[in-house]
Image: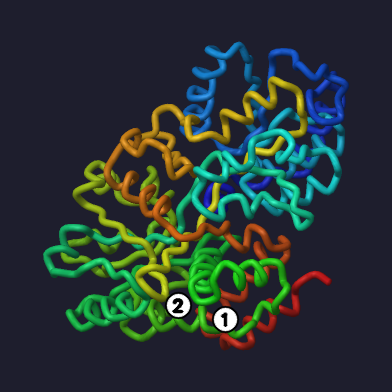
Amino acid sequence: MRWRRLFQGIAVAAVAMLFASACLSEEGGGGGGSDSAAEGDGQVEILFGFGGDQSKGFQDGLNEWAQANGVTIKFSEASQSFDTIVRTRVQGNNLPDIALFPQPGVMLDIANSGKMQDLSALLDKTKIESTLVPGELSAGTAADGKLYGVPMSMNVKSLVFYPRKAFEAKGYKAPTTIAELESLTNQIKADGTPPWCVGIESAAATGWPATDWIEDFVLRYGGPEKYDQWVKHEIPFNDPVVVQAAQEFEKLALADGNVFGGRKAVVSNAFSTAANPMFSDPPKCMLHRQGNFITQKGFFPEKVRANLDEEVGVFQLPGTDAANKPVLGGGDLAGAFSDDEDTKKVMTHLTSPEFTFADLAASSWISPHKTFDTSKYPDETTKAIAELAYQSTVFRFDGSDQMPGAVGAGTFWKGMTAWISGQQDLDEALKTIEESWPS
């Protein structure tokens, strides 16, 4: 998940070297390259990249099940730079049994080493797919059809938040189509308030929130087929559907009078606090498109978070018609390096609707299974977000997280920043990104 990586920082080379040395000096490692017995040794190591309350919620939730099922879990937290650490361990053949990947591109790249298990042979794929949000397995499936990752968490990005009390007092209604969203935007503007709160400043990663807008509208206008082609570069980055997506973003949120502070302020407005002006009295803006992570501590003002259900409303960014309800998102994909019975047992539980984090109020975890008991979620806002995802027509993983790093975490960010700030027009920005795609 991109926002999480932004706060974790990047491990310096010295740390990576020290870690590599430690890894190579360790004995064993239960992964796919080991000689462990097929029945397992009763211990399963899981490498993951989230920390803080999420780490505690994950460990507490899984340990409760593990203790009841005779398995000891070794938790290896790599929250400083999961990408660096998992690659180092694979290169050193010091493999964990299971790794939880926040980026499918990294996972599929590592799968090319031949050290990861095809989960189609390890798990009941048909059973898993029957309860997942439609499309969830696509991110973990390689071009040859082998399945290397199954989601064990879900982040929902196609969301529009609003200040509930002020929004309802004005008589505004949640839109069900893009046309209705345009009408709502115009109505809010006519009533004297800039409709949108937008900020794309994120230090070295400035620009990434704008990429989510583009991805969301490519998914809506092009459908999952065109979206997948774009992400895989089977169509050019500046394909007409991408131009259409960017133009819709511009029409809604960047036009004169449509964004708090004006278009030029968007680039300097921090993404982490961009929504906060809508909680002023009166609101300085009314709508904010962002992922569900924004309800966690550190984003909305604490007085708002303390009364989340009363203060915050949310609706799904609509599609071209009311029946079209695609969801852009992310999550952590569980992949396996070992195929012993203990690993299989843990993977089966991790990827089932029965798996849950502990203390969902603190860990802010959402299950990717549409059959998950939503009464377990800590508040009505989280429950509503989950239900929007469970009722969606299709799910697609964040596109830039699947693209080559030079594009998805490089020229795409920079191109959106250059376009929004006026340094380049849209055609120039998209052409520059297209030309940057590795050959």
**Residue 201 shown left or right of residue 126 in the figure:** left
x, y (%) of residue 268?
46, 69
Residue at x 67% of width, y 41% of height: 82
Find residue 241 and name its label.
1
In this rendered view, identify the residue nearer to me: 198 or 350.
350
x, y (%) of residue 106?
72, 50
* Figure check: 119 above or below 37: below
x, y (%) of residue 34?
86, 25
| Amino acid at the residue labelled 1 | Val
Which quadrant of the figure has residue 373? Answer: top left
Residue at x 52% of width, y 72% of height: 214
Q: Secondary structure at mark 2?
A: helix
- Specify whether residue 233 is in view: yes
- Specify whether residue 413 is in view: no
Earlier-in-chain disc, 2 versus 1: 1
Which quadrant of the figure has residue 277? Answer: bottom left
Residue at x 80% of width, y 19% of height: 38
Residue at x 76% of width, y 41% of height: 118
| Amino acid at the residue labelled 2 | Phe
Question: Real-space Cα distance between discs 2 and 1?
Answer: 13 Å
Which quadrant of the figure has residue 71? Answer: top right
Residue labelled with disc 2: 249
